[in-house]
Image: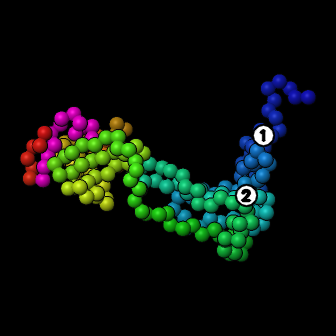
């Protein structure tokens, strides 16, 4: 019989970390080994303990313009992981492919804000992404253009915490300034406001 306030056994098992060969237990009782990376080119698994896990996950923390996202690099059985890994003595190395560097697809997303500043249009989409079009052509690299526009508008590049604004923050600040009737500029330096 349990005493009042005593935790059930399964709760204590979940709170334990660094189990031999696994990190997490699913609701079905499956043992999962989980590895998290940022810039690593491989993840190491000990051959002597991997057999304790039935499932495996490799997660990559990506940061873009100061914003983090988690990418699932691998999710499957420990046997699938073993088959896709290189045998290097006492360990198995799962090789990590470089994250894609292709731009975010913005087509089909709703526009939530925009400002026309001379020949440039700064656009914010429903997912928070910022794009800049110059004479109707989308800029490939946005942040330097936003910094230039912010400088001309006299906007600070720092956020409320005193850190450099990321692309989304800077784009939103420019759109807010453009929508309040703040002075905007053209390519020839003439006030278009």
Query: Residue 58 location in percent, x, y?
Result: 62, 59
Q: Residue at x 12, y 53 (%)?
A: 187
- Using residue 97 as the reference point, say whether residue 4 is left or right of it: right
The crowd level at tag 1 (other Cα within 10 Å; few <14, some 14-19, many 20+) is few
Look at the image and tell me whether residue 170 can be seen. Answer: no
- Tell me: residue 113, above or below residue 47: above
Rendered image quadrant of residue 97: bottom right
Provide the residue span drawn in magenta.
174-187
Furthest residue in direction front, as rendered: 108
Q: Residue at x 40, y 59 (%)?
A: 103
Furthest residue in direction right, as rendered: 1
The crowd level at tag 2 (other Cα within 10 Å; few <14, some 14-19, many 20+) is many
Query: Residue 61 location in percent, x, y?
Result: 53, 54
On-image quarter of the C terminus: top left
Residue sitting nearer the eye, 75 or 135: 135
On-image quarter of the N terminus: top right
Element under label 1? helix
- Tell me: residue 35, above or below residue 169: below
In three-dimensional space, the C-alpha distance between marks 1 and 2, rounded to whole angstroms, equals: 21 Å
Residue bearing mark 1:
12
Query: Residue 148 location in percent, x, y?
Result: 22, 51
In contact (CB < 8 Å): disc 1 and disc 2: no
- Using residue 106 as the reference point, say whether residue 115 is left or right of it: left
């Amino acid at each position: 019989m349990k005493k009042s306030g005593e935790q059930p056994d399964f709760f204590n098992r979940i709170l334990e970390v660094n189990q031999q060969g696994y990190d997490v237990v699913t609701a079905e009782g499956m043992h999962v080994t989980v590895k998290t990376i940022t810039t690593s080119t491989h993840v190491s698994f000990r051959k002597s303990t991997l057999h304790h896990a039935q499932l495996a996950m490799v997660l990559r923390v990506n940061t873009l313009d100061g914003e983090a996202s988690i990418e699932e690099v691998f999710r499957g059985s420990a046997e699938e992981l073993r088959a896709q890994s290189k045998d290097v003595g006492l360990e198995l190395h799962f090789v990590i492919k470089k994250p894609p560097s292709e731009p975010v697809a913005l087509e089909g997303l709703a526009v939530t804000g925009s400002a026309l500043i001379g020949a440039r249009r700064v656009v914010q989409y429903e997912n928070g992404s910022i794009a800049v079009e110059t004479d109707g052509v989308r800029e490939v690299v946005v942040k330097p253009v936003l910094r230039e526009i912010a400088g001309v508008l006299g906007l600070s590049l720092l956020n409320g915490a005193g850190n450099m604004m990321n692309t989304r923050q800077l784009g939103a600040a420019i759109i807010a300034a453009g929508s309040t009737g703040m002075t905007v500029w053209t390519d020839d330096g003439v006030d278009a406001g």
